[in-house]
Image (spheres, rainbow, N blue to C red):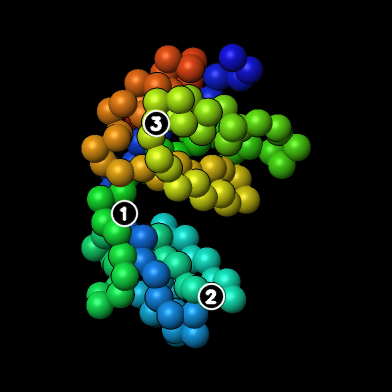
Amino acid sequence: MEKKIRLRVLNEKFCISKLPVFSELPHVFMNAEMVFISRTDDELSILCPEFMAPSNVQQETGWRCIRVHDPSPFNEVGVLASLTTPLAAANIPILAQSTFDRDYIFLMEENLVPATQALQQAGHEFVHEE
């Protein structure tokens, strides 16, 4: 294995919602602690804690999040691949999100235990909140 990556499982359950492309962004997300918003020419997607999810839209609930614990510099190669490869080998579908500092892997709750096992077998380490 290349580099051991420290990971943390977040406690929250998440929801991904698909809104019409020209929807106005709900104000609740302006000061949200953790939300991923993607707008393209054909959709607006919001990934947020379940309790914040918009209603009456297409959505999927029950997502859990594995967060890369330490920031990764932009020139570091293969961070996401070192996480997604063992998950793909274990046949675990994921949704990946990245920020300036970190990568986040979202997966359905029923896949959380096998995912943590696959990542540990790949040499990665899970840490608890500090």
Q: Nearer the viewer, residue 127 or 45?
A: 45
Q: Earlier in the sequence, mark 3 or mark 1?
A: 1
Residue 24 shows in the view: yes
Disc 1 secondary structure class: strand
In space, the residues marked 2 and 3 are separated at their CA atoms by 29 Å
In space, the residues marked 3 and 1 are separated at their CA atoms by 21 Å
| Quadrant into which the N terminus falls | top right
- Image position of 21 (left or right of 107): right
Please name the residue shown 25% across and 77% down the image: 56
Please name the residue that numbered disc 1 is placed on.
14
Residue type pointed to by label 2: Asp
Please name the residue that numbered disc 2 is placed on.
42
Image location of residue 69, percent across then percent down: 49, 34
Please name the residue shown 49% across and 66% down the image: 37
Please name the residue shown 40% across and 40% down the image: 93
Please name the residue that numbered disc 3 is placed on.
91
Image location of residue 61, percent across then percent down: 26, 56
